[in-house]
Amino acid sequence: MKLIANALILFTGFGCKANCTHNPGMAYSFDNIVPSANLTWTPCFDDFTCSKLEVPLDYSNKSLGTTSIAFIKLAGKNATIESPSIIINSGGPGGSGVDLLLTNQALASQMFGDQYNVISYDPRGVNNSGLTVDCFSGNTEARLVFNRLHRTGSTNVSSTSFEEQYYSSSIYGDWCNNAVQNESTHGYYVTTPAVAQDLLTFIEAEAELAGQPPSDAKLWFYGISYGTVVGATFASMFSDRVERMILDGVLDAEQYYDNTWKDSVDQMDEAMEKFSSLCHSAGPGKCSFWGPTPANITARMNNIIRQLQNHPVPISGVPSRDTPTLVTYSDLKALFVTTIYNPLLSFPGMADILHQVERGNVSALAGMFSGQDITSDAGRIIQCTDSYRRNKLATIEEFKSYAEYTVSKSKYIGDIWPIVVETILCTSFQPQLPDSMVIKKSNRLLLYSDPVNGLGKPTPFPILVASNTIDPITPLSWARRTSSRFPGSVLLLQEGIGVSHY
Ligand SMILES: *[C@@H]1O[C@H](CO)[C@@H](O)[C@H](O)[C@H]1NC(C)=O
Ligand SMILES: *[C@@H]1O[C@H](CO)[C@@H](O)[C@H](O)[C@H]1NC(C)=O
Ligand SMILES: *[C@@H]1O[C@H](CO)[C@@H](O)[C@H](O)[C@H]1NC(C)=O
Ligand SMILES: *[C@@H]1O[C@H](CO)[C@@H](O)[C@H](O)[C@H]1NC(C)=O
Ligand SMILES: *[C@@H]1O[C@H](CO)[C@@H](O)[C@H](O)[C@H]1NC(C)=O
Ligand SMILES: *[C@@H]1O[C@H](CO)[C@@H](O)[C@H](O)[C@H]1NC(C)=O
Ligand SMILES: *[C@@H]1O[C@H](CO)[C@@H](O)[C@H](O)[C@H]1NC(C)=O
Ligand SMILES: *[C@@H]1O[C@H](CO)[C@@H](O)[C@H](O)[C@H]1NC(C)=O
Ligand SMILES: *[C@@H]1O[C@H](CO)[C@@H](O)[C@H](O)[C@H]1NC(C)=O
């Protein structure tokens, strides 16, 4: 669902309801669950069962040892022993599937139906699974200083901003390399091809538990956003093991593995411009930034953008934090980014804020940009290890042409996007990974057409690719390209604005 998990998702907390000890057999944390090579489900979080599955660190060299993957299961109310389990894969990279299912319990059974079990998991390197790395080793001051050095704001917010973003990015990789070297030798063994193998291990373990032959085990899968890269990777590596697959809100796997994410800016302005027409048709009672025509609304938004570009607004004390701040153009751009992840839900709130800003009250924008600081490294580590042999965004020239491209494509978000998507942070990552864990370097995407390794075969049942007609983060063009790569797949379009149907 969400691409940039650490920055943009507001996780709703989940913990012990009232009293954690009321049921001694009930686990409320994965810390209390013992990893095992055979699948064992423990009751957890009241309505779920949880498991930690031991998997090889490196499937090509099992002597390297194991790590563990946290799975969570919501049994279908009307499920039988034969009922399939649908694995839902969260966005990110770096998103926690455990958290996704815990916070969307009702929606999950509503979406799929009570005849199915719904399962999710934390991929390697994420939350409750093994191989998590903190690149700053708990040194919060170093992390904060890095964020301030690197996250200077919109690309061209000052004459030095762009260069500062480029040159500071190597610091991040250096810290991650050190943390992995000193504290977590296999911390980089978190690539998506390994995750696809883990899913195969899981469905085989599930089959074994049900007394069925593991070699017949098939995957039922629903992936959103980055989760579609996991699905596409699995379907390429193990095409004959796909029973049903839905890829919703598609992130193009080729642009992901190349670390370009180039076309993600395709439909951003189309989505932003819907704000004016929707606000206008909603009327002044429902949209506080209403104006007599959509063009009037757009013009007033542009005024606000221009104003803040030239005049940051000082706030002597932010009430909630009791610190002085300067509200900047980048704070406004950060608001736009947050908003387009879920336009229909967020437009009314954006209207309220713009209405206040127009009257000179910018307090709601205070801290908006720094609030998106990098606080968890899982997403970047997965993204950078996945792309390290193919990275097409490494030199300052590549970064410049990328930034100029995003600026040319999106007036509203193009100049903040490079520092939000953070592809540039991969520059100095040095993962020493075995071939088995990475997608090979190639101009064409071998992932989908590698007859030597048996990749690129059609799946036994067609893949369903789904997209909104206006998708501001994972644009429709990505869904079309992905669908064209999987023979027989079908593209389902929904007239709507937003990232996925979920
Ligand atoms: C939690 O439940 C246990 C057993 O019912 C009880 O002894 C204990 O006092 C409760 N603790 C709290 C903090 O409510
Ligand atoms: C796992 O299951 C297999 C087959 O059911 C069994 O042979 C093996 O002993 C089990 N291993 C453990 C660690 O329980
Ligand atoms: C497998 O890993 C072991 C332990 O690190 C190492 O000694 C061995 O050389 C590796 N084998 C291969 C084929 O890479
Ligand atoms: C549960 O499954 C039975 C048998 O397939 C079906 O008749 C019934 O309608 C289902 N109930 C619900 C609530 O889905
Ligand atoms: C990690 O998983 C726990 C459940 O074990 C959940 O409560 C928490 O929100 C998750 N954290 C993140 C950052 O996703
Ligand atoms: C980690 O290792 C690097 C060099 O390998 C060293 O310079 C650094 O001080 C170490 N960091 C910690 C936190 O131990
Ligand atoms: C928008 O409409 C209002 C109300 O008619 C008008 O006062 C204002 O000047 C218009 N603004 C722009 C930028 O067109
Ligand atoms: C300023 O805007 C914020 C939120 O946008 C609002 O809560 C606050 O009441 C406003 N202050 C004034 C003086 O209108
Ligand atoms: C930043 O501004 C300079 C000078 O105006 C311009 O040449 C460059 O293309 C701009 N860069 C981006 C990414 O917009």
Image (cartoon, rainbow, N blue to C red):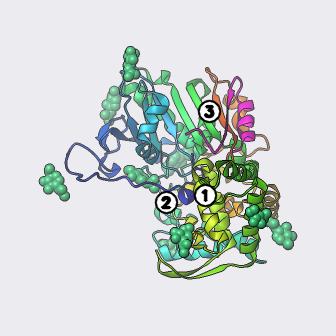
Judging depth in this view, the residue of 140 and 217 nearest the camera is 140
Q: Which badge, 1 or 2, comes first in the chain's sequence?
A: 2
Q: Is residue 233 above or below residue 29?
A: above
Q: Earlier in the sequence, mark 3 or mark 1?
A: 3
Residue 277: where, in percent of width, then height? 72, 49
| Mark 3 Cα shell of 10 Å, populated few (<14), some (14-19), many (≥20) | many
Residue assigned mark 2: 133
The Cα atoms of the two marked residues, 3 and 2, are separated by 27 Å
Q: Earlier in the sequence, mark 3 or mark 2?
A: 2
In the displayed structure image, the side of residue 19 where residue 280 appears, left or right: right
Give the image quadrant in which the ligand numbered 7 is located.
bottom right
Dot 3 corresponds to which residue? 237
What type is the residue that disc 3 sits on? Met
The answer to whether residue 416 of the structure is visible from this angle is yes
Which residue occupies the extreme bottom position in the image?
A: 316
| Rendering quarter of residue 478 | top right
Magenta span covers which residues?
Answer: 475-502
User: Does residue 395 appear in this view?
Assistant: no
Q: Is residue 124 magenta?
A: no
Residue 498 on the magenta span: yes
Which of 231 and 48 lies nearest the eye of the viewer? 48
Q: Residue at x 66, y 67 (%)?
A: 332
Question: Where residue 388 appears, x then y in whole percent?
Answer: 67, 54
Amino acid type indicated by mark 2: Val
Residue denoted by label 1: 338
Q: Spatial distance from mark 3 to mark 1, Cα to Cα?
A: 34 Å
| Label 1 CB less than 8 angstroms from ligand 8 | no
